Amino acid sequence: MFSQYNIVRLTASVFKPGEYELQRYAELGLPMTQVHDEDPDALAAAVADADIVALIGTKVPRKVVDAMQNCRAIARFGTGTDKIDVARATELGILVANTPFFCIEEMADHVMAMALHFNRRLASQHQGMMDGDLARARRDTANINRMSACTLGLVGFGRSAVHTARRAKGFGMRVLATRQNKNAPRAEADALGVEMTDLDTVLRESDYVSLHIPLTPATHHIIDAAALAKMKPTAIIINTSRGLLIDEWALVAALKEGRIGGAGIDTYGLIDIFVEHIPSPVHPLVHCPNVILSPHTASASIQAKIDMMDAGIQNVVDMLNGYLPLPENIVNPSVKTRFPFKQRIRD
């Protein structure tokens, strides 16, 4: 059914197709060519005849997009598309699709795990136990506030933020949130008891601030030195979204000078997280007090991987069949596609 098409799967260095993805291609009869390269010239040659370019973490700059002479769509298996020149793809009539909701529960779990880690002083207690210094371990718990006495601030109120709010409410926390679209429906926030407000209030009143927004020119370094200065000196910043939402040098300075309580970071602007090894020094945050770092694994779970592959491959199947993906999976809805897609009527 799909044998006449050419699906080029870009693998980057750590995102080769797994057993489940390969099984799904085989079951659906989808021909797929793997490209184990990240050099723009090599990628440009590899995608020249592609009908669909599928990827997870590979950078797709303008030069590579320009080479997509026959491509009807770029299928991102995952959420963020800041590594893809979406603007150029739009100019050339190439649809860009993603899978935005595959890991919303995992992200919410990761945020709450980081918040609880800081709240219960687990790292310092563990180290105290390892050192045999029980007095120090106990001292570190002297100023703990119960979670129900704390406020969580959400920057953005999309699906992962909603799930985070549900979890935080389960701990009895006060939850504040801000969003770019001030006229968006408030029914869900009202039902959860989330107070919608402005960014300054979120920064000023929250004990934990968690980022849940995409990286755009408007959100680049939305948490800069001025934003950090508005936060409580005991507050924790948590980022499981996109690294460049935070000015990391400003964060390093605030942590070292004690102007902020701590940081839980899962994604970075100063390093490429999509590699197997990072030479020392890994990142300036490594040498800061009261941080917990994870290698962009907030999305990790068996179920999330399956959901991502199912949604991404469904996007590919829809587009090869001449249909648009689900509206929420279309990254550039204003594109005038070079291929005449139809709108599927779904149940």
Image (tube, helix red, strand yellow):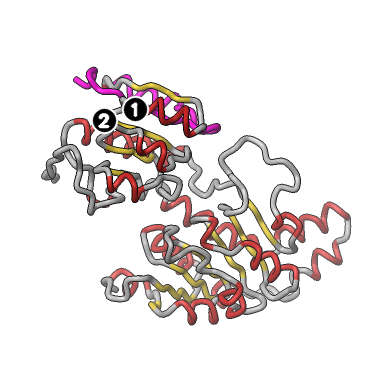
Magenta range = 1-27
> What residue sits right under mark 1 in the picture?
48
Front residue of 197 and 249: 249
Query: How many circles with numbers are drawn on the protein?
Result: 2
Q: Is residue 54 left or right of residue 17?
A: left
Disc 1 marks a residue whose amino acid type is Ala
Q: Position of residue 308 (x, y in %)?
A: 38, 40
Q: Secondary structure at mark 1?
A: loop
User: Which residue is rendered at x = 24% and y = 43% of the image?
Assistant: 93
Q: Looking at the image, which residue sits at the far right?
A: 132
Residue 140 image position (x, y, % from top left):
77, 68
Mark 1 or 2 closer to N-term?
1
The residue depicted at 22 percent of the width and 21 percent of the height is 2
Q: Which mark is residue 70?
A: 2
Q: Observer-nearest residue: 27 or 5?
A: 5
Q: Do labels 1 and 2 touch, CB within 8 Å? A: yes
Element type where label 2 sits in the image: loop
* Residue shown at the point (51%, 32%) measured from the top left: 38
Nearer-the-camera pick, 35 or 308: 35
Q: Is residue 256 magenta?
A: no
Badge 2 density bin: few <14, some 14–19, many ≥20, Cα 10 Å: some
Q: Whole-percent x and y of residue 177?
A: 42, 73
Residue at image coords 27%, 41%:
94
Relative to residue 78, is residue 274 drawn left or right? right
Q: Amino acid at mark 2?
A: Asn
Above or below: residue 92 compared with residue 37: below
Q: Name above or below for residue 74 compared with residue 22.
A: below
